[in-house]
Image (cartoon, coloured by chain):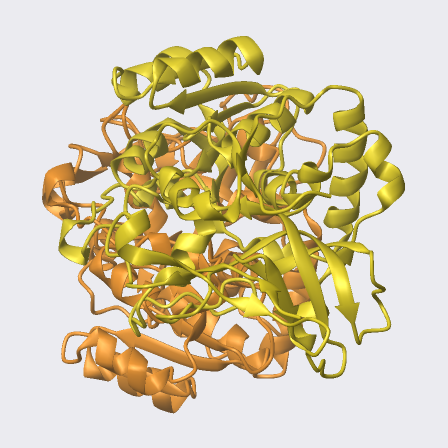
Chain colours: A yellow, B orange
Amino acid sequence: MAVSNKGLILKEYPKGLPNADKHFELVPRTIDIKNLNLGENEIVVKNIYLSLDPYVRFTLREPEPEYVSVDTLLEKRVSIGQVIIGVGVSEVVKTNNPNFKVGDLVYGPVGWEEYSHIKSDFAAIFSPINKESLKDIPLSYYASLLKMGGLTPYASLISIGKPKKGETIYVSAAASAIGLLVGQIAKIKGLKVVGSAGSDEKVDYLLNELKFDAAFNYKKTDLNKALSEYCPNGIDIYYENVGGQTLETVLNHCNQFSRIVVCGMISQYNLPFNEKYGVKNLEIIFLRSITMQGFIVSQYLGTDIQNEFEKDFTEWIKAGKIVYREKVIDGIENIAEGFVNLFDGRNIGRTIVKVSDY
Amino acid sequence: MAVSNKGLILKEYPKGLPNADKHFELVPRTIDIKNLNLGENEIVVKNIYLSLDPYVRFTLREPEPEYVSVDTLLEKRVSIGQVIIGVGVSEVVKTNNPNFKVGDLVYGPVGWEEYSHIKSDFAAIFSPINKESLKDIPLSYYASLLKMGGLTPYASLISIGKPKKGETIYVSAAASAIGLLVGQIAKIKGLKVVGSAGSDEKVDYLLNELKFDAAFNYKKTDLNKALSEYCPNGIDIYYENVGGQTLETVLNHCNQFSRIVVCGMISQYNLPFNEKYGVKNLEIIFLRSITMQGFIVSQYLGTDIQNEFEKDFTEWIKAGKIVYREKVIDGIENIAEGFVNLFDGRNIGRTIVKVSDY
């Protein structure tokens, strides 16, 4: 017997900002789980919580030989007519894989759909969720905070930023899902944390909820003056989410041996090459012995730092040391709108879609 | 009794390229060594070989609050009327420092003059030269190759570039004193080495003397096409000496997890800000998880990598594995001209000034 398996497909490659109606379509489909033949190591999962992550935007790109990022398993390009791929929490409903049994809760890459038929290569990177832990921690946290959504800021800040007590960190896009965790981890590590965001509501949140040492609305403030005022001893770590002219200005404030963790350059992606901002003061990287480093979260999977992350974050969450804002949207019907809203600049924190009850 | 102590002083801050007559003056001075009173830990040295290094250009800058590099001991700004400071090989002729006796050969920061009165802070970073080693190695090599001139390419390439056998490295300004050593170290480490330089003579040298896998004259070649041809598997390490548009083009050829060792950005230093080249594709640093890192050679002094460098280089030089081109200029009278010629693009290798016999 077939059940509903609505899924969101890519209708057209977005140029610039994605639009829910123009670029996506929720397709009514069905899946006959009982009669589905599974290949070796394949599983079928019922999706519960899907995490809406900005990186998914990169998977929606036309083939562009000059600019391709590497097609890792998680960031594989989606073609027209294919279901969008993200990550989330699911329940195993059928299995031909000895690592998973029916009823297991798992985390891994799934389609933005009600049920996903997981091939062996994807199944190999699924991880189990310990049901015991759900006494203390909401299941939705396993869709992002305790997985890639927390690992991304933790691993990049620790391994590239190398935070030392007493140093100053500046976080751009500080009210983003990544930024607000970077700031809190840095506070826990004893740094002076300065953040910027694009609305007064976000700045209030950074100052009053997250206890940043300083925060400002970049739309109302001269960045150069703000950094002179809030980072009088210079910047030791810049957590870079923005790029372009922001990077140029920040470089002028970076200290000798400072580190720039390149998590994104969101001001530049949606521009054609000739409209991108040219950064003119890169010689400062040489003059001040700066490290500027990009990363991909999958490079940390299975390493020591992932273990440290899980230990630290579980402890910090239970101890109330992490303030986390999660917006849960109900129903696969609303996933396209939830995704495009990631880019409208109003979001604070992580958006999760609840696809089914658990 | 006073002896001659001619010294080269800064007459005017160079804007752009330095000019021997306009910016420098060789001043006739004397020094009365016998009657000179030495403070604690001070020494007087007779300079033998002085190394002419491009970094000295940075010490000749006007105070510029927006752009200052850090004033390390070695790269301290020189004021008008002061003697230029560089590094070289000298003989101790008077000492009030228990670490040095008269007749010792030493390496350290000295003025561009016949004799230098070394204060205690500078004396603390002088190192002795083992006279035994002079059976196998010319004394002039201790002015640069076996000291900072070799440590710079070795330590930066190993610690930032992390070369792995079979990888591809592209070296810009490959016939410079640093570049030719970078290429040779990379060959020893089993990399495919591609270099560019600004004359056919230099390209011949790279290909025929140093056995680079590929080399091209950047003035006659489209860089993008050359990199496509010579680095068909992309670039794993870019040893950056040039900056500007070269960096932008190279970034398009950089592989996932590639490393950019920022040794200099010589195309950009002498330009006013609004004429500097704006690099538009830095998002590739994020998209391909690239590390771009500047350094200062003094960060490696006294570390394990300095010991490894001295061991490796001594062995490689004795075994003839390092081809080194050293131009020795005779006499302090010619030091200003030798220095400004570093920037005329015709030099291959290191220039040393012989100030006195040993």
Query: Is residue A92 or residue A187 the one in the foreground?
Result: A92
Q: Is residue A122 visible?
A: yes
Q: Is residue B91 visible?
A: no
Count of marks overlaid on the render: 0
User: Which part of the image, by quadrant, shows the N terminus of chain A?
Assistant: bottom right
Q: Position of residue A35 (x, y in %)?
A: 70, 79
- Left or right: B58 as drawn, with respect to A278: right
For image coordinates 54% across by 32% down, the residue present is B122
Q: Position of residue B71 (x, y in %)?
A: 42, 29
Query: Is residue B256 or residue B270 the one in the foreground?
Result: B256
- Residue A19's place in the image compared with B43, above or below, is below
Query: Is residue B168 or residue B253 the one in the foreground?
Result: B253
Location of residue A43 by image quarter: bottom right
Q: Position of residue B130 (x, y in %)?
A: 67, 58
For image coordinates 34% across by 31% down, the residue present is A345
Name, please, the residue furthest toward the right.
A132
For image coordinates 74% across by 41% down, the residue present is A309
Location of residue B272 by image quarter: top left
- Left or right: B109 as drawn, with respect to B57: right
- Residue B37's place in the image compared with B54, above or below, is above
